[in-house]
Image (cartoon, rainbow, N blue to C red):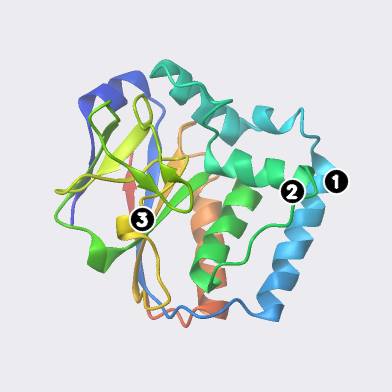
Amino acid sequence: MEITVSKIVRDACPDLSLAIIKCEVCNSPTSTDFWVEMEKEISKIKEKYSIEEINKRPEIAATRKAYKTFGKDPNRYRPSAEALCRRILREIPVYKVSTLVDIINLVSIHSGFSIGGFDIDKIQGNIELGVGTADDEFEAIGRGVLNVEGLPLYRDEIGGIGTPTSDHERTKISDNTEKLLMIINGYSEKNGLTEAVDHFKELLQKYASLKEFKVEWVE
């Protein structure tokens, strides 16, 4: 599987860097020990940010800038990292889904990066990062049809699989996922990406029986 960036995205977002992680793991219900780590991160976000300030966090602000570049309103279609942090700051509990999904959410909250998570076995062919159009049909996880026109959009040979706002139902992580693809979207060069990759590896080793871990960079 090859992951490439289209010319329209590369020209519009010259500071874009992607960390692409492919790994073999074991999914499970989220453990109490993991959730202790999540609660600690939730507390840190509450101490460090206000809801008025969270969209100025550099990683989030850079993603919002990309949305505006393509004509999408980031206040209406928020990047997932911002949406998670706003949820925390509004005192709404962070949902528990499964170990793999919750690990992605924790790293996203900690780093400020919007992160795609996919079951590799559900992806068809290669992936390209382009821009959504009015013709793209996209069923977002847990939210129904999402208007992806003007959003950065990952497509495989069948169609869209993910945006920084939400991933697609077709390729989502399930209880049976063993081969995991994660894409960390860095719209402000490589700043912080290495630390996010290391954080993923640590958490997957502790909680998801990590067997194999490969990292590729697209800059």
Residue at screen point 21% across, 44% down: 159
CA gap, disc 2 to disc 3?
A: 24 Å
Amino acid type indicated by mark 1: Glu
Query: Between disc 2 and disc 3, whose residue precedes?
Result: 2
Disc 2 or 1, which lies upstream in sequence? 1
Relative to 54, does residue 73 appear above or below in the rendering? Answer: above
- Which residue position is annotated with label 3? 169
Dot label at residue 27: none
Give the quarter of the image for residue 131: top left
Task: For mark 2, give the secondary structure.
Answer: helix
Q: Which residue is mark 1?
A: 47
Dot 2 alpha-carbon crowd within 10 angstroms: few under 14, some 14 to 19, many 20 or more: some
How many residues crowd mark 3 within 10 Å: few (<14), some (14–19), many (20+)? some
Q: Is residue 1 left or right of residue 63?
A: left
User: Is 118 positioned to the left or the right of 32 in the image?
Assistant: left
Left or right: 206 as drawn, with respect to 151: right
Compared to residue 127, the image places residue 34 above or below, namely: below
Q: Give the amino acid type for the residue marked by disc 2 in the picture.
A: Ile
Report the residue marked by disc 2.
88
Determine the residue positioned at 45% across, 40% down: 164
Look at the image and tell me in which quarter the N terminus lies: bottom left
Going from the N terminus, do you reach mark 3 or mark 1 first? 1
